Amino acid sequence: MIIGPGNYEVAFTDVDGRPKKVTLFMGEEHVEIFSSSSYRVIVGWEKKVGKSITKIICLSQNQMATLELTN
């Protein structure tokens, strides 16, 4: 599944096993990441195949999480 532009909620666990959730807004050319927890996103990066976003790497203060959006 390749997802397109829109709003998505992504739940994951951090390196300490704590549940986290971020809301992603995916535009045609950019991604905005909103954190609803103490996980504060500093850098959002997107890799695109055609017009579909396939990967976002979120960098927090001391850790990096890669959110794969394809299977």
Image: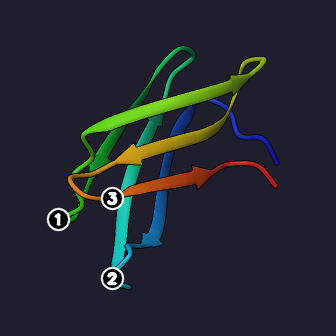
Q: Position of residue 56 (x, y in %)?
A: 53, 41
Query: Which quadrant of the figure contains the C terminus?
Result: bottom right
Q: Is residue 27 left or right of residue 35?
A: right
45 is higher (above) or lower (below) than 59:
above
Image mark count: 3
Label 1, label 3: how many angstroms apart (C-alpha)?
13 Å
Within-10-Å neighbours for mark 1: few <14, some 14–19, many 20+: few
Q: Position of residue 39 (x, y in %)?
A: 24, 61
57 is higher (above) or lower (below) than 26:
below
> Residue at horizontal 17%, vertical 65%?
38
Residue carrying label 1: 38
Residue carrying label 2: 16
The colour scheme applied to this rendered structure is: rainbow
Disc 3 marks a residue whose amino acid type is: Gln
Q: Is residue 61 left or right of residue 14?
A: left
Q: Position of residue 26 (x, y in %)?
A: 50, 31
Residue carrying label 3: 63
Front residue of 15/50: it is 15
Disc 1 marks a residue whose amino acid type is: Ser
Element class at badge 3: loop
